Image (cartoon, rainbow, N blue to C red):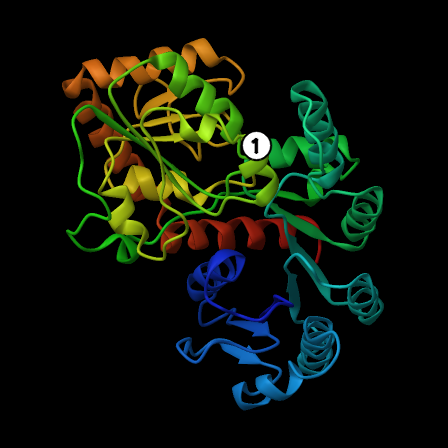
Amino acid sequence: MIKALYPVYNTGQGVAYTCLSLCEYLGDEDLPVEAWFPSSDKAICLPFVRDAFPRWAMPLIYRLPNPERRLAKGGEKAFLRALRPGDIAYLWPGVSLETYERIRERGNTIVTERINCHTMYAKRLLDEEYARIGWKGSHGISENDVERECREMELADLVYAPNPFVVRSLLEAGVAQEKILPVSYGWDPRRMRGSTRFREKEEGLTALFVGRLCVRKGIHLLLEAWKRAGIKGNLLLAGAVPQDVAQQLAVPLTYPGVVLLGHSLDIGSIYRSADVFTFGSLEEGGPMVTYEAMGCGLPVIVSPVGSSDARDGIDGFVIDPHDIDEWAAALRKFAEDKILREQMGHSARERAREFTWEKVAHRRRAVLMDALQQNGL
């Protein structure tokens, strides 16, 4: 059996959503899957989900000091009690090193999920970007984080790497090639159902960004590209705006046509509000938003790391995020050529059909089975 552990309260959103989406289709009759959480929202009633704490206990736990830590530790203890000889421990970010070590001592196979590039790679890249643009503040990755992840990689038998940049970052950090499982993330067409729009389109091109507005996502570069494009229309920014970004980008966020939508759970209606999807991320693990946008028939302008299997010149344009002039030119092309938008949007939709969660999870299972056999696990 595969037993997944995500040591954070399960809201069904964010990383928990990714974990649930993969676990739903990863198993079969010969190799079933359980997904363990400290506890889950009441709306999540999936048969493979296991909770360490009942929902009724949550108000009591949150009255105690450090409730998140208590939940995480309790979830890990319950997971260890449930782990049997021969089970595969599928560990998600946040699991403690102590739990990694205890599983290693028991002899269970450890498969770990990397939702981003290795922190060693990410820290170097973001340190350079913060210095280049002269921003104050921090991206939040410490040397301790790097040391911790290096130790996790030593203890893991296999590592899911959801894009080629994650693979490269793991190799640079010294992870053995035979440990790395090159895979992808995906999307759920069910989340995109509906016909309503979050915002009615106005005259000109409607470009869309979805995600947390931060340096890692390249929001400062996208805003500059929008300004240089000089086109009529709107740039919709759907996502939370951290305080430091609001301060540092106070002027760019007021450029003509820039519209802050905030965070919304009705993501399908947001994609239906746009003509083109833009995502110039500097560091990612395989952004699901790009798959979703393509699945909704949007052509894309994306960075290589944010491309999520989009094909340059077919599904849109894949451009170095620092090449502001090329980004601006791509925005102008789409603004001036509706037929091009429609052609590339159709290609993007067809491409995305190959990356539904069901297909992605089945490929992941096949890759895992091959690796287990080859590595004698």
Whether residue 214 can be seen here: no
Residue 204 left/right relative to 132:
left
311 and 280: which one is in front? 280
Q: Amino acid at mark 1?
A: Pro
Residue 36 appears left or right of 48: right
Query: Which is nearer the eye, 376 or 97?
Result: 97
Quadrant for the C terminus, please: bottom right
Residue at x 32%, y 23% (from the top left corner): 316
Vertical arrangement, residue 356 with respect to residue 335, above or below: below
Q: Is residue 186 above or below residue 84?
A: above
* Residue 80 in the image: above or below residue 168: below
Q: Residue at x 49, y 68 (%)?
A: 11
> Picture coordinates of residue 1 (x, y %)?
58, 72
**Residue at screen point 83% across, 64% down:** 101
Query: In the displayed structure, does residue 109 sit left or right of residue 305?
Result: right
Residue 264 on image: x %, y %? 37, 54
Examine the image and state in which quarter residue 205 appears: top left
Q: Quadrant of residue 112?
A: bottom right
